[in-house]
Image (tube, coloured by chain):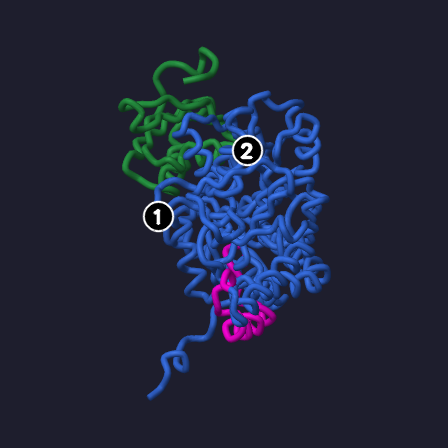
Amino acid sequence: MTSPLAVASPRATYLDWASTAPLHPAARAALLAAWDEGWADPSRLYREARRARQLLDLARQSVAEALDARADEVFFPHTGTEAAHLAVLGTLSARGRVGRRLVTSPVEHSCVLHAGELHETGGGTTELLAVDHTGRVIVPDRLPTDTALVSVQSGNQEIGTLQPVADLAGLCGTVDIPLHVDATQSVGRVPVSREALGADLLTASGHKFGGPPGVGLLVVRTGTRWRSPSPTDERGAGRVPGFENVPSIVATAAALQARRSEIDAEATRLAGYVERLRTGLPGRVPDVEIVGPSDPAARLPHLLSASFLYVDGERLVGALDEAGFAISSGSACTASSVTPSHVLEAIGALTHGNVRISVGRDTTADDVERLLATVPEVVSALRADAGVGGL
Amino acid sequence: MSGSPSDAGEPDLLVDARGRRCPLPVIDLARALAKVDPGGLIDVLTDDPAAATDIPAWCRMRGQGYLGFAPIEGGAAMAHRVRRLS
């Protein structure tokens, strides 16, 4: 009998690395080994348990080293979303007497904004800092005195904009307000140092950089006031309730270590691909709005957002899929809701006909050239189909 | 609706794009542009949340004037006002 995999169509050119990455070879090797070696309950006292505990501790040490943190400051929630929820809600909870104001930005990942909404249902307030037309946060002169936490991402998940995190850390430091940095798009893609960022809390997600799904990263600086928003649990050092996924945590640490040795050379290559698309698309197809900062130093190296006037985003993604490209979109009609990307809305960019193209470890120059040839054809065909030529 | 006194009053053309989802309200507006003279006012009625961003964005890309919006139907829809500039 023939395996369905054997007759599957050729693999698409994957250009959605900002959503997730395929398992890194180093993570695969570590995962297989840890499933054999680290399956036992790390809280128990027999040999297999001690082995699992040892692997977990080594993984924690390795992640701490990679992020410039201490091992006892690193915790492993089950997703990046859960990590951000814990960082935001745990700090707000612990600092309730100081103030009930969360200061964040309108371009954060929805997990931070949703944590803010939950905070508001409990009587707290959420204040959104202004951003410029590239999505960069405008650092205020001062923070309200009742600010309990400032939460800002390192780089944006849709348009790549880097945020002035160090400036915000300086502002927070002068008035002793903790800073949470959502570094989900940055960790494993560009060097990230908790110390250099000046973050009191830092969160990320393993599957973004080639770890298996199901491992978030939460760093809480020693001395940061934090109280678990979850019921008490003996495991996870009181930060993350429940049984630790030791094999996946070990694999995540292996992926992060492997990425550290790759990203210097890779960042230049990927930035070149993105630059090629940024400059190449507008000349090949009319009425395209390239979103985000034009200065490469002001954005992450691996992603590009572009909106094509008069084009239906869902049809665009579908047509590119048919042409063999896996790409995501921030347009409303491609999501489950009718609301478009809150990031595109916040900066006033065209929200329809949007694609987010993101490159990664396996992307080649040939992939980019084929995409550059295909997008204009696809967009022209969709526009002709909609009868919008000449508008 | 915000804007100067000359922006007030009845539009020269009313585009009813209610019930139509992105990118159709913007396409409707683009088609309507030729039907008014430069300086003319177009109102686009829409209940598509994306239009609140996309109509001003279209005006910016096409060099037309976005004058603002006002809720209609008790907030279930919006009237966006555009002035043809070129």
Quadrant housing the C terminus of chain A: top left
The residue tagged with tag 2: helix, strand or loop? strand
Residue A391 appears in the rendering:
no
Left or right relative to A89: residue A361? right
Tell me how far mark 1 sits from mark 2, CA to CA.
25 Å
Residue B4 appears in the rendering:
yes
Magenta residues, start to end? A17-44
Subunit under mark 2? A
Q: Is residue B53 magenta?
A: no
Mark 1 highlights which residue? A336
Q: Is residue A24 magenta?
A: yes
Q: Position of residue A192 (x, y in %)?
A: 67, 50
Q: Amino acid at mark 2?
A: Thr
Q: Residue at x 39, y 30 (%)?
A: A121
Task: Report the label total.
Answer: 2
Q: Position of residue A292 (x, y in %)?
A: 59, 42
Chain depicted in blue: A
Q: Is residue A290 above or below residue A260?
A: above
Q: Is residue B73 above or below residue A314?
A: above
Q: Residue at x 43, y 46 (%)?
A: A331
Mark 2 highlights which residue? A104
Q: Amino acid at mark 1?
A: Ser
Q: Residue furthest top?
A: B5
